[in-house]
């Protein structure tokens, strides 16, 4: 693992350029999707109406939403294909897979928060909260893609499936969007921006580097593996 | 002293005699011959019979009327020339028609065509005469009580003055030979809304002094021109009509477009009535031009309720199309207003609740894809661009004038028929497609349970998730603060 030229020896490479690019892609897509999608869901709000008119009207907004959804789908599929290929070819450890340890880590952390334990849970490359975020967005993302496609092509879909699938897809799409929005807005932004350890911003996903101190605190098991020379 | 008094009295009497009314003077003018005739002809019930047609006319002359008339100083034989010789020939006329023709030629003996032709009414009669008709003077001018043209003192108001001619059947002839009846039914006029008006309030330019001659190209030209009178009082309504589709058609030169009197009538203008009878009559007015639409409407759920059940809740033409500023219903702007029009009743519990109809129809429409899109199109029209694509509104699924109840088997809204409606905009839609629509129902355990379950699950799950995440963040921050 190379050191960051700016941070000296104490910086450790955490994310590859692919992941940084992927993150930017997701940031852009989700921002566009939330702006164009939630304004449609909450169409009755003055702000939504103002925003939609600023974006060129409802037809424009719907097309922007569909194209952004297309790019998001591409990104998500690529993410899964690359991850599966990486794991299958043995190049990557299945570090994002949910294990029993994640549940015990959550319990341990709760104990630590309530003062029943002195140390927080010792986590690997991704702690249980990061995994939760990833999987909710991944699973939610696939649900959004599926239901979004149904809403995009209702005539085609109803040639095979019953008509009720359309309002069901709409209910899932708009509710799940809100869920993902809240997890992203609340959970991810708080963790990556307002969390006392990283404030004012967790820059690791933008620079690709993380400090050794943070690694020791947040991902001690991964740091130990790195020090032992175990491949990621 | 007595002599002076006598002189003064004589002077006063002379003055009084000089100032007495003309009628007073005419009494003394009544000819000796007339007085002789009136010995018999002033008696009530005296009539002249005609042997050929068995008809009769009254032969009585009312002394007072005759004396006050323009001809009060004439001898009877001035008109009844057959009696000049002093005899009294009987049964001179075989029929009433011959008698009437003879009386007219008696009048025309003094009143030449040149003399009477200056009056537009007479000019019209003379024109008709040249076409073979036989106008009779006494149809308008009473035989023995005609008044002087310039006098008119026996008329107490303008209406009476005008009616002295216009109570009789007479026609105005247009340049295209169409005839317009100028007969006015006073009893009709007086039972309607304009009973207090004077004739010249509408027929401006006409008075006792003036009766301008006007000729019109056609009957329709006259109707359109006469509707201009209405704006003198009803200017608000008139300005509204300037924005109407009817006026737009009229201004393009199409005189078939309705003007005020086509709907409101001319002399029989009724008060606005909100009774069932009044509302039915209103639909009849529209029917005059829109007969096909009326037929559809009368068979619709609304029309049947109005006509068969005397229901006042159902809409009539003007409730959707308005009255004076009627818009072109084929425009996008009009189309986009339809949900609000239907919603005026169908979202109002006081109107539709008693029929067991849901008032959620407007809300559920506006919250769905079509309603939301429509809402934005309306706003965009003002700010961005004019959307070229019409969005389905109430009438696109339910029909317009031929609308039927959703319970009816022929209803286009029942699922079997709905797909045809969907295919108007979505030609590839199959029979599954209509079920994509929730039929104005809010999802509930009985209606669309799948959607209800999904929404409820998220409604429960979302707050739990958010609260959990917030707690986790708060605990984390709290622990961090404690550790420091």
Image (cartoon, rainbow, N blue to C red):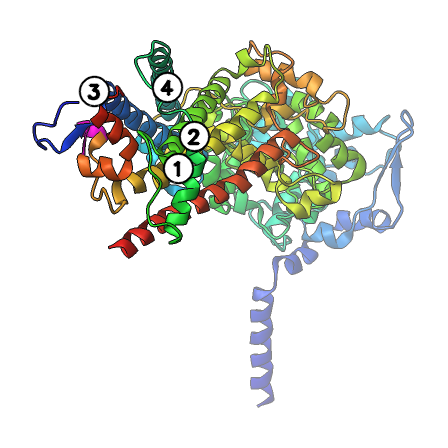
Front residue of A76 and B138? A76
Circle nearer the N terminus (4, 3): 3
User: Which tag, 1 or 4, sits closer to the chain's start?
Assistant: 4
Counting from the top left corner in percent of width and height, residue B92 is at 85, 29
Give the image location of residue B128, x and y in percent: 63, 22
Of A209 and B4, the residue lying toward us: A209
For the residues tagged 1 and 3, is the chain the same?
yes
Above or below residue B24? Residue A153 is: above
**Residue with the mark numbered 3:** A17
Q: CA distance from mark 4 to mark 3?
A: 17 Å
Quarter-of-image position of residue B10: bottom right
Q: Nearer the viewer, mark 4 or mark 3?
A: 3
Q: Chain of mark 3?
A: A
Question: Which structural element holds mark 1?
Answer: helix
Subunit of label 1: A
- Left or right: B134, with B472 as reference point: right
Task: Give the residue at mark 4.
Answer: A76
Give the mark, 2 or 4, whose residue is nearer the N terminus.
4
Quickly name the residue at label 2.
A136
Magenta part of the chain? A205-211
Looking at the rendered image, the quarter that the C terminus of chain B falls into is bottom left
Q: Position of residue B382 (x, y in %)?
A: 36, 33
- Do the numbered discs 2 and 1 sit on residues whose CB atoms are within 8 Å? yes
């Amino acid at each position: 693992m190379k050191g960051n030229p700016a941070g000296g020896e104490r910086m450790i490479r955490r994310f590859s350029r692919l992941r940084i690019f992927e993150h930017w892609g997701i940031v852009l897509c989700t921002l566009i999707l939330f702006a164009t999608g939630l304004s449609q869901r909450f169409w009755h709000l003055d702000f939504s109406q103002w925003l939609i008119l600023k974006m060129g009207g409802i037809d424009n907004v719907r097309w922007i939403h569909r194209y952004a959804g297309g790019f998001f789908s591409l990104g998500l599929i690529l993410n899964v294909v690359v991850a599966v290929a990486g794991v299958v070819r043995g190049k990557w450890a299945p570090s994002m897979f949910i294990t029993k340890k994640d549940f015990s880590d959550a319990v341990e952390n709760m104990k630590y928060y309530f003062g029943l334990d002195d140390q927080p849970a010792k986590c690997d490359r991704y702690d249980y909260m990061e995994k939760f975020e990833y999987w909710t967005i991944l699973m939610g993302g696939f649900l959004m893609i599926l239901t979004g496609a149904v809403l995009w092509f209702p005539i085609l879909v109803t040639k095979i499936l019953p008509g009720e699938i359309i309002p069901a897809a709409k209910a899932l799409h708009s509710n799940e969007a809100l869920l993902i929005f809240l997890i992203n807005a609340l959970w991810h932004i708080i963790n990556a921006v307002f969390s006392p350890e990283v404030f004012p911003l967790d820059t690791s996903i933008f620079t690709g580097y993380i400090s050794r101190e943070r690694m020791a605190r947040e991902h001690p098991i991964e740091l130990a593996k790195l020090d032992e020379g175990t491949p990621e | 002293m007595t002599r002076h008094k006598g002189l003064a009295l004589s002077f006063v009497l002379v003055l009084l005699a000089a100032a007495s009314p003309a009628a007073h003077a005419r009494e003394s003018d009544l000819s000796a011959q007339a007085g002789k005739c009136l010995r018999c002809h002033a008696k009530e019930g005296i009539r002249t019979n005609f042997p050929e047609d068995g008809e009769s006319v009254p032969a009585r002359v009312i002394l007072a009327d005759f004396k006050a008339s323009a001809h009060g100083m004439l001898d009877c034989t001035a008109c009844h020339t057959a009696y000049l010789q002093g005899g009294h020939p009987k049964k001179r006329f075989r029929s009433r028609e011959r008698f009437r023709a003879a009386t007219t030629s008696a009048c025309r003996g003094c009143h030449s065509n040149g003399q009477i032709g200056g009056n537009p009414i007479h000019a019209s009669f003379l024109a008709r005469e040249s076409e073979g008709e036989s106008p009779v003077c006494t149809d308008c001018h009473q035989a023995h009580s005609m008044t002087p043209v310039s006098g008119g003192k026996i008329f107490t108001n303008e209406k009476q003055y005008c009616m002295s001619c216009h109570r009789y059947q007479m026609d105005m002839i247009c340049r295209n030979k169409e005839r317009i009846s100028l007969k006015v039914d006073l009893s009709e006029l007086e039972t309607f809304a304009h009973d207090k008006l004077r004739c010249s309030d509408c027929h401006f330019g006409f008075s006792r002094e003036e009766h301008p001659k006007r000729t019109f190209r056609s009957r329709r030209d006259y109707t359109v021109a006469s509707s201009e009178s209405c704006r003198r009082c009803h200017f608000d309504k008139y300005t509204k009509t300037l924005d109407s589709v009817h006026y737009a058609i009229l201004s393009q030169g199409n005189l078939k477009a309705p003007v005020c009197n086509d709907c409101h009538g001319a002399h029989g203008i009724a008060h606005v009535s909100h009774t069932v009878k009044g509302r039915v009559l209103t639909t009849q007015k529209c029917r005059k031009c829109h007969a096909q639409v009326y037929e559809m409407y009368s068979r619709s759920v609304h029309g049947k309720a109005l006509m068969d059940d005397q229901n006042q809740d159902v809409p009539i033409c003007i409730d959707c199309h308005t009255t004076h500023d009627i818009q072109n219903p084929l425009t996008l702007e009009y189309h986009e207003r339809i949900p609000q029009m239907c919603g005026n009743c169908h979202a109002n519990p006081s109107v539709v609740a008693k029929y067991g109809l849901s008032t959620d129809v407007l809300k559920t429409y506006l919250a769905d894809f079509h309603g939301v899109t429509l809402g934005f199109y309306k706003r965009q029209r003002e700010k961005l661009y004019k959307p070229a694509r019409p969005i389905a509104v109430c009438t696109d699924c339910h029909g317009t004038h031929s609308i039927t109840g959703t319970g009816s088997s022929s209803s286009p809204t029942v699922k079997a028929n709905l797909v045809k409606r969907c295919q108007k905009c979505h030609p590839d839609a199959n029979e599954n497609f209509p079920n994509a629509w929730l039929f104005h129902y809010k999802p509930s355990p009985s209606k669309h349970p799948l959607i209800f379950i999904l929404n409820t699950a998220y409604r429960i799950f979302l707050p739990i998730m958010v609260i959990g995440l917030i707690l986790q963040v708060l605990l984390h921050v709290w622990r961090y603060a404690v550790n420091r």
